Amino acid sequence: MSTECTFPAATILGYPRIGPNRELKRAVESYWAGGIDEAGLQRVADELQDRTVARLVELGLSAADSSIPADFALYDQVLDATAALGALPARFADLAGDDGSVGTAEYFTLARGDGDRAPLELTKWFDSNYHYLVPEIGTATTFSAGAHRLTATVRRQRQRERGVVLRPVLVGPITYLLLAKAEEGSPEGFDPLSRIDDAVVAYVGILASLAEAGAEWVQLDEPGLVGDRGGELAAPGGLVERVYRQLAGTAERPALLVTTGYGTAGNPAKPGEALAVLATAGVEAVHADLVKGAKPSTEALQALGTTRLVAGVVDGRNVWRNNLQASLEVLEHLQGVTGTVVTAATSTSLLHVPHDVQAETALPEHLPAWLSFADQKVREAVVLARGLDGGRPSIAAQLQDADAALRQRARFDGVVVDRVRNRTRDLTEEAFTRGPAERRAEVQQQRLGLPVLPTTTIGSFPQTGEVRGARAAVRNGSISQAEYDQFLRQEIARVVRLQEGLGLDVLVHGEPERNDMVQYFAENFDGFAATEQGWVQSYGSRCTRPSILWGDVSRPQAFTVPWISFAQSLTERPLKGMLTGPVTILAWSFVRDDQPLGNTANQVALALRDEIADLEAAGVAIVQVDEPALRELLPLRSADHQAYLTWSVRAFRLATAGAADQTQIHTHLCYSEFGEVISAIDGLDADVTSIEAARSRLEVVEDLAGFGYSRGIGPGVYDIHSPRVPSEQEITALIRTALAALPAQQLWINPDCGLKTRGYEETVVSLRNLVAAARTVREGT
Ligand code: GLN
Ligand code: ZN
């Protein structure tokens, strides 16, 4: 290790990879479709990489001092680590070359599967909306020291004019194994982390090849240490210390930066201890998340010695402009206590935020000045470093601007709306409580007169090219609003007729008017703004465009009612109104950071409550409030779960508890592993809950029965995630499985999720089989 390497004064942990115009997404999809070959894809990726480096230099980072991270995953950074380590599950063993390297085609095979081979599983990356591909580690997984792509990137950049020195980024060995699942067939209780010694050997090799390629620093991300196991692992003398002693003790390596975004690493009661442990182990720089994580203790800071502290004061997760004044104070404090220079950095990679506020042309006038996307955040880190070095006068103008924006935001009309505040303040317990569930079930049944095992769907019907085309046409003005509305009415009428023909018991309008289940609500509520270019990577080539929740939320007027009551007017059968729940609306938006999430959730809940009241007034007897993201926002540490579940469940209840006893409230959750959230689901007090279950063969009904769940439940009997059509026999068997655990009076028959991504061809046959299966079983009961 060359000892003269000092760490730069400003950096970011990572930058959006998809490109300002989603270039990478397009190139990757075109490569999959055969439009471009591997060389073509590589050309786009290299060009994007060069443009990113140039842009970051323009924003104030240096190309020569390792301040620019090299995190250019084509699909996912965890998949990159899997490929770098050659740690392939047995079913994909043939994808690695003789030297353990994984080529581009093989890399995508891991992500997408082929033939009968299922791809690696996708799962949420910490508590973000990014999803990574889960490594599968067994007792026999091999770890080889490849990292060919990363090495090639470092080498390629070094060879460019003037020699660009990037800082390669790799998921650290402990986090890598913590994120892994035991490969199928592993012995009961096998813990992937038990393979750490073999993984470390491979990391040692990777460090050597990166050093040889010319990397001066390497970044190992260890956010796994902010979870439940972090306390034990990062305690003095624990695994973290042992592993990093080994890595730091190797001769041929770049200097090491270990990052810990997404919370407080290690024992939350001893903030900073994990950093001190890493320093003791011999790591040259450690990063702390100072947005979500706690400030390291004085004791821990003093124990850092010569290890550089990289202070994550710029929020990598949200879009608000930094309070530079406050950040500078934090940095000055840290610098004072450590007695050494501190680096100004982001709390996490900027992967979670869009590229550039400047690309937005249609935001409400007041908003841009309050916002900071990736490019603005890079500048913030750079400015903070300059202020820390040169003193406040050196950044006086920037401090003033940030301060002015913050003040303007705090008193802006719409950020605090008295009418909204008074409503949330005056809430009594009654607003969260409905009548007894048994009584509700009785009056609802009198009103609805449904057969046992009622059949229904989750809400959306296939969004065909025609539907998307019409939406694009009204947006670009080639059809009028009236023409578009007429189109939507025809579409709704068609979907209602189709459902009647299929013989479903509870119908839906099909959601053709909704582009996205959250954005549609954001567009119709006050307090939200939509972006035009604000794409963020969700997984692989998939991007989402979260709305920005900037002010107090309310609902100016009913907006789902016209569509739903129109649909209801077309049929004698009960039609289910469709809303998105408060927690999901928050989870899939950028939310304001100036008040507790629970307060914001209650405002959204009241807006939904108003909509439900209007739906009831229009004669709608069933309303579904979707909460697919309920479990997603679960905090990383179990000690924090209860507090979260309390406010999130209360928000759902606030949204729905205004409904009369004879209005049936449904909810839909997009997963089947309930574990500890089962009592929270019970706490939602919905009359009927539909859940995903087909892929796990309805295992969840046992859990529900064991818990004593007594309300209506619709475990999905049709897996909508693939075009495969389930046969009538198959669905019949699943229904019988459910009936073995739960009484027929409780069961609903429905697909796993909305049908939006499906085609009509398979949807119609599948639903026909679903209805037939329900009838068959009904006759037998
Ligand atoms: N009602 C929504 C739909 O059917 C639910 C989608 C979801 O759960 N993600 O599309
Ligand atoms: Zn779903």
Image (spheres, helix red, strand yellow):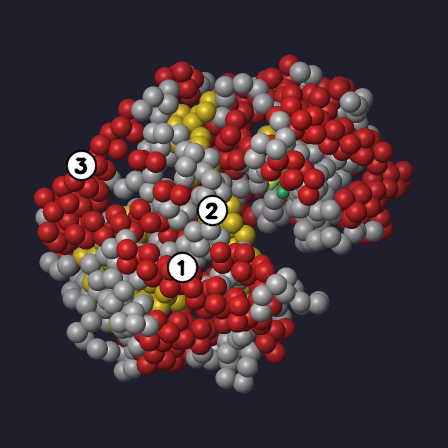
Q: Provide the secondary structure element on which disc 1 rests.
A: helix
* Image location of residue 548, percent across then percent down: 43, 36
Residue type indicated by callout 2: Trp
Quickly name the residue at label 1. 224
Closest to the camera, between mark 1 and mark 3, is 3
Q: In the rendered structure, which disc, 2 or 1, sits on the residue that comes first in sequence?
A: 1
Q: Position of residue 463 (x, y in %)?
A: 68, 41
Q: Is residue 7 visible?
A: yes
Q: In which image quadrant can residue 253 be found? A: bottom left
The residue that label 2 is drawn on is 535
Q: Amino acid at mark 1?
A: Gly
Tell me the SS state at disc 3: helix
The residue at which mark 3 appears reads as 400
Indicate the secondary structure of the residue bearing disc 2.
loop
Left or right of 712 on screen, residue 12? left
Task: Determine if the C-beta at disc 3 is less than 8 A from ligand 1.
Answer: no
Pointer 3: residues within 10 angstroms few (<14), some, or many (20+)? few
